[in-house]
Amino acid sequence: KQEVTQIPAALSVPEGENLVLNCSFTDSAIYNLQWFRQDPGKGLTSLLLIQSSQREQTSGRLNASLDKSSGRSTLYIAASQPGDSATYLCAVPFSGNTPLVFGKGTRLSVIA
Amino acid sequence: GAVVSQHPSWVICKSGTSVKIECRSLDFQATTMFWYRQFPKQSLMLMATSNEGSKATYEQGVEKDKFLINHASLTLSTLTVTSAHPEDSSFYICSAAQGDQPQHFGDGTRLSIL
């Protein structure tokens, strides 16, 4: 059974810092890996999707890497801003049309 | 991009009532829809998977008679929480997928049972 773990559970940084969020999964047989952002009481915003054959994806100040063999992914946020404060979730599906298994998330606070 | 609409966004009701939540794919045909539940400070947990025209598949521990799922068309799935009780209060969120394309999520429904 796939399990997804995210470390740290919470993180507080001053504005402008670069930071790394970690995600690990127990079963390397994944179809892809997604990073989401969730604001309090809100739904999910998809940030980055990395296919199993890829090693990284970039969007603006965000960069996500994937090491499938070791069961790890990282989300790098450059030059953090207060608006980046949210919970970041990573999730993996077993195959293309199967449900996502989510980690518990990392709650990020960026202090101005 | 693909859009999934979920309604209502927030429901408050008395214990014992039934609540229906709708999930619609607005610009694509969703062959599969998923229903997740999220308790405070917890992650999203899958409740059930539904494929258009067939019965939903429920995860272990989810009562199929309490959480009725209907996926009657390629653009609409509904989740009905029957005889809701305070312990059913949670954030419910649906997602829709077309074939093996990535899932697209609705904005969620916050259900509060008094």
Image (cartoon, coloured by chain):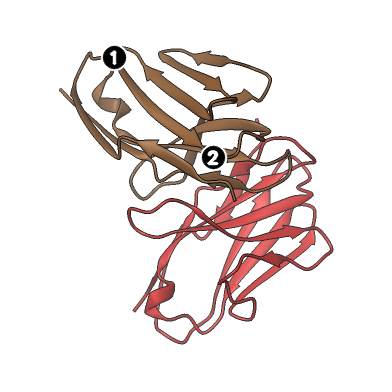
Chain colours: A brown, B red
Above or below, B19 against B76 in this view is: below
**Which label is found at residue A18?**
1
Q: Residue furthest front?
A: A70
Residue A63 in the image, given as x and y percentages of width and height? 46, 15
Q: Residue at x 46, y 46 (%)?
A: A43
Above or below, B36 against B59 in this view is: above
The C terminus of chain A: image quadrant: top left
Q: Do the residues under discs 1 and 2 have CB atoms within 8 angstroms?
A: no
Q: Residue at x 53, y 80 (%)?
A: B18
* Amino acid type, callout 2: Thr
Above or below, B77 against A16 in this view is: below
Q: Residue furthest right?
A: B53
Total numbered labels placed on residues in the image:
2
Q: Report how far apart the C-alphas of labels 1 and 2 lie in the structure.
A: 27 Å
Above or below, B58 against A87 in this view is: below
Chain on which label 1 sits: A
Q: On the image, numbered disc 2 is attached to which residue? A: A26
The reply to whether residue B111 is in sight is no
* Amino acid type, callout 1: Asn
